Image (cartoon, grey):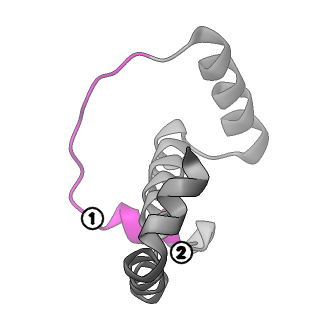
Amino acid sequence: MIDREFNDRFTMIQTREKFATQVNSKILKAVRALSEAEGRQIQALVEEALTDLLDKRKRAKPRANVMAAYLSSHEKYGALYKKLAE
């Protein structure tokens, strides 16, 4: 995960693009409170949240060696797996 302080400084020098969206009012209220408590802008919190989401999704992909082992196992024991599933 990207260090929050580094992320805040790094994103300040990056090109920014405005966009609009809607969010659950309770979530927005909590984000505003967090922004105030941490002394950070909401855009910094949103950027951190989006970065964390992208990191999480990136890690969710199965590793190549895991997929290779799965496929090899399925080739060898596919018929057995099918019978067990019945």
Task: Tell me the quadrant of the picture where the C terminus can be found.
Answer: top right
Residue neighbourhood size for the residue with mark 2, other residues' Cα within 10 Å, grouped as few (<14), some (14–19), many (≥20): few
Q: Which amino acid lies under the numbered mark 2 shown in the image of this protein?
A: Phe
Residue 66: image tag? none
Q: Residue 49: x and y, percent? A: 53, 48
The residue to which callout 1 is attached is 14
Please, is residue 41 above or below residue 56 in the view? above
Give yes or no for residue 15 being in the magenta stretch. Answer: yes
Please, is residue 52 above or below residue 21 in the view? below
Label 2, secondary structure: give it.
Answer: helix
The residue lying toward the viewer, choosing from 23 and 66, is 66
Q: Residue 2: x and y, percent? A: 55, 73
Describe residue 21's horizontal placement relative to residue 69 as left or right. left
Query: In the figure, residue 34 lies in which quadrant?
Result: top right
The residue to which callout 2 is attached is 6
Name the residue at 39% across, 85% down: 68
Q: CA distance from mark 2 to mark 1?
A: 13 Å
Q: Residue 70: x and y, percent? A: 46, 77
Q: Which amino acid lies under the numbered mark 1 shown in the image of this protein?
A: Gln
The residue lying toward the viewer, choosing from 7 and 68, is 68
Name the residue at 56% across, 49% down: 85
The residue lying toward the viewer, choosing from 61 and 33, is 61
Please, is residue 50 above or below residue 11 in the view? above
Magenta-highlighted residues: 7-22
